[in-house]
């Protein structure tokens, strides 16, 4: 996390503490321990890079045309590398469970860098007196084993992290985010250019989306404290530059059309209503945020709509919506077809529209046959505009930015003739066929481009042709409503050829089940919504089962609040979640209050007796979200 000093001292921003999420830093503002250390020799770097292996986890396209997430492992011996792979899978699937990453995962390449460690673990874990370990990236708790730091400040050698990340071809500091995972179950992490997290802690997978919110989206923390367990006081600055903090009232936001005025009054994705909730930027009073809680305030919840819009723009800004197009450096004749190849979000299709001399001539197609336009003699300007119509964005300035709108322009001269280009029918890019696709996914298949016009793509589900009007390069499986009680086979074929792609469609969501500690009594029959009666604390363990391999994210919510990622218990991933009437305080944060969510000790601790509904669901590795199931609990006074 980034401490308050980043608002005054920009130079400290890259090394600010992610550990503030779950720890109370003791260093003064501006004196937080660095997220990275650097004590590396050239010989060390040579040995390090020689021993590292780059493993592609998800490849959606050329690295230089994608946003690249590079995950490094430290303190995993050769025998423990399968554990590292499992930790990576968990972190990535938790990331894919949250919007907008779920919809834009196709914009992201994921790479793991495996480096066998001579010894298991990392330095100063969990204490300053713990043995030092010989590990490739020199990761260490206590800010690099500094007695003046805090335990959960987990650092990595910056020179080594950079050298190893540079092994991934096509990636640079500008198109990647690096996350270093330590082989540890102790909670810890830091933020900045090289984010860190402990690989095996219950909460560690929740750090990754939060930290990318900082690093990529420039989102600010919405905590109303800096040191854990200590209220943050009153904000005394001017109107924050942060897009999700303000001093304005709701009326002023609407009147001035400022900040998140377009989202006011809506049910927040992270729970409650988007409005004006006091606290943020490490202050308890005097500054307001959009939601009662969200990912930037309480890890485990989703980004709210305001943060999601910001993150959608930030992810999209790392790529170009137009991946390729008919060459336009010189005028072309009107005896050919123009084309654009675009990106393909998993959550929806991009829109393409065409104009000639400013007049609309076509939409929803990626190829424009100029011969059919019967252009008048002379020169004309043809423009293709590619836009992301996502409902995640409402600000026209964001929609019109280069992140979400791109144009390509050609000069067409009717006096020119176009030499034919040999382009045998073939698929040039497509949704990966190596893993099942989810039942709500948009699947794509791009082809070669002959000058005389496009090849058509024909789609079939379980052998039966399906209609796909307009842009035939994308198929929205969700619109076909594939049956959820079985899997399916999807094919794409270039018309008139045997060129075919085949996908397995995973239409069956993972199943979740719950186990509770023994109640005073249970009302209702098994197989129906049951009510469990308690007069005090009780535990809930959620488990998931899927018919396919891959880490499954399990979530729950209480009384219709925001969905919350289940992680076990903060101190033990294998322990069940503990609900109590007022919540349990752990290191200055509060977990498990039944009823209204409580994050910090000064939040309302009044026990909420009576009936409460707990819903639970799963999100599998293909992106399928299960239907919510529920049970009720009734809390009574002793």
Image: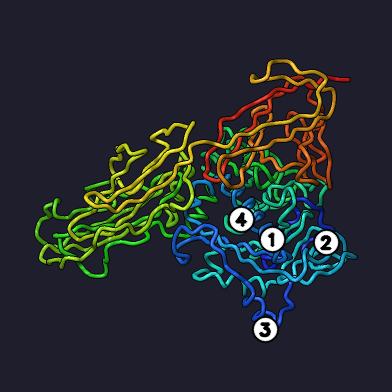
Can I make out residue 44 in this image? yes
Residue at position x 42%, y 33% in the image: 481
Towards the viewer: 603 or 20: 20
Q: Residues within 10 Å of mark 2 (few under 14, many from 20)?
A: many
Q: Quadrant of the C terminus?
A: top right
The dot on residue 330 is: none
**SS label for mark 2:** loop
Residue tagged 4: 212
**Residue 576 sits in quarter:** top right
Q: Position of residue 470 (x, y in %)?
A: 28, 43
Residue tagged 1: 181
Is label 4 in contact with label 1 (beta carbons under 8 Å)? no
**SS label for mark 4:** helix
Compared across the picture, whether 346 is left or right of 499 comes to: right
Q: Position of residue 519 (x, y in %)?
A: 81, 23
Q: Position of residue 524 (x, y in %)?
A: 70, 15
Q: Position of residue 492 (x, y in %)?
A: 33, 47
Q: Quadrant of the N terminus?
A: bottom right
Residue tagged 3: 42
The span from disc 3 to disc 1 (Cα, nearest Å) is 23 Å
The dot on residue 125 is: 2
Counting residues from the start of the chain, the first of labels 3 and 1 encountered is 3
The span from disc 2 to disc 4 (Cα, nearest Å) is 25 Å
Counting residues from the start of the chain, the first of labels 2 and 4 encountered is 2
């Amino acid at each position: 996390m980034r401490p308050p000093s980043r608002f005054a001292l920009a130079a400290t921003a890259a090394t600010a503490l992610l550990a503030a999420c779950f720890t109370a830093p003791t260093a003064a503002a501006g004196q937080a321990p660095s997220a990275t250390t650097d004590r590396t020799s050239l010989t060390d770097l040579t040995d390090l890079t020689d021993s590292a292996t780059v493993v592609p986890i998800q490849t959606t396209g050329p690295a230089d045309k994608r946003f690249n997430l590079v995950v490094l492992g430290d303190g995993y011996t050769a025998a423990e590398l399968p554990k590292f792979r499992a930790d990576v899978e968990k972190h990535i699937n938790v990331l894919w469970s949250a919007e907008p990453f779920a919809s834009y995962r196709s914009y992201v390449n994921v790479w793991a860098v495996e480096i066998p460690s001579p010894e298991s673990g990392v330095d100063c874990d969990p204490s300053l007196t713990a043995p030092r370990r010989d590990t490739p990236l020199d990761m260490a708790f206590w800010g690099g084993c500094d007695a003046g730091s805090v335990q959960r400040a987990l650092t990595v050698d910056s020179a080594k992290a950079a050298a190893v990340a540079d092994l991934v071809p096509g990636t640079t500091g500008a198109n990647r985010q690096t996350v270093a995972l330590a082989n540890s179950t102790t909670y810890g992490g830091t933020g900045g250019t090289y984010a860190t997290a402990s690989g095996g802690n219950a909460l560690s997978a929740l750090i990754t989306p939060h930290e990318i919110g900082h690093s990529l989206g420039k989102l600010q923390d919405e905590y109303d404290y800096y040191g854990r367990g200590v209220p943050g006081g009153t904000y005394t600055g001017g109107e924050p530059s942060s897009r999700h903090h303000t001093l304005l009232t709701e009326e002023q936001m609407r009147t001035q059309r400022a900040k998140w005025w377009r989202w006011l009054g809506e049910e927040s994705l992270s729970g409650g209503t988007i409005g004006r909730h006091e606290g943020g930027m490490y202050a308890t009073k005097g500054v307001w945020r959009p939601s009662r809680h969200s990912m930037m305030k309480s890890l485990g919840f989703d980004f709210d709509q305001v943060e999601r819009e910001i993150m959608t723009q930030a992810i999209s800004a790392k790529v170009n919506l137009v991946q390729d197009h008919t060459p336009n450096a010189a005028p072309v004749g009107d005896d050919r077809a123009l084309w654009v190849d675009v990106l393909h979000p998993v959550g929806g299709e991009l829109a393409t529209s065409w104009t000639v001399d400013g007049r609309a001539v076509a939409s929803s197609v990626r190829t424009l046959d100029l011969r059919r336009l019967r252009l008048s003699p002379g020169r004309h300007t043809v423009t293709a505009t590619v836009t992301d119509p996502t409902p995640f964005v409402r600000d026209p300035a964001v929609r019109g930015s280069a992140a979400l709108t791109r144009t390509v322009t050609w000069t067409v001269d009717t006096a020119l003739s176009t030499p034919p280009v040999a382009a045998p029918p073939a698929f040039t890019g497509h949704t990966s066929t190596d893993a099942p696709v989810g039942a709500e996914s948009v699947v794509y298949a791009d082809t070669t481009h002959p000058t005389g016009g496009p090849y058509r793509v024909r789609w079939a589900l379980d052998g039966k042709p399906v209609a796909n009007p307009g842009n035939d390069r994308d198929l929205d499986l969700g619109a076909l409503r594939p049956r959820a009680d079985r899997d399916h086979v999807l094919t794409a074929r270039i018309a008139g050829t045997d060129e075919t792609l085949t996908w397995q469609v995973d239409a069956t969501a993972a199943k979740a089940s719950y186990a509770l500690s023994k109640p005073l009594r249970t009302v209702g029959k098994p197989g129906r919504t049951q009510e469990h009666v308690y007069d005090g604390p009780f535990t809930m363990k959620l488990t998931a089962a899927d018919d396919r391999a891959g880490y499954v994210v399990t979530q729950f919510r209480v009384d219709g609040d925001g969905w919350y990622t289940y992680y076990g218990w903060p101190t033990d991933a294998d322990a069940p979640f503990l609900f109590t009437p007022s919540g349990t305080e752990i290191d200055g944060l509060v977990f498990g209050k039944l009823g209204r969510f409580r994050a910090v000790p000064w939040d309302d601790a009044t026990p909420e007796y009576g009936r409460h509904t707990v819903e639970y669901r799963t999100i599998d590795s293909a992106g399928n979200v299960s239907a919510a199931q529920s049970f009720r609990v009734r809390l009574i006074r002793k």
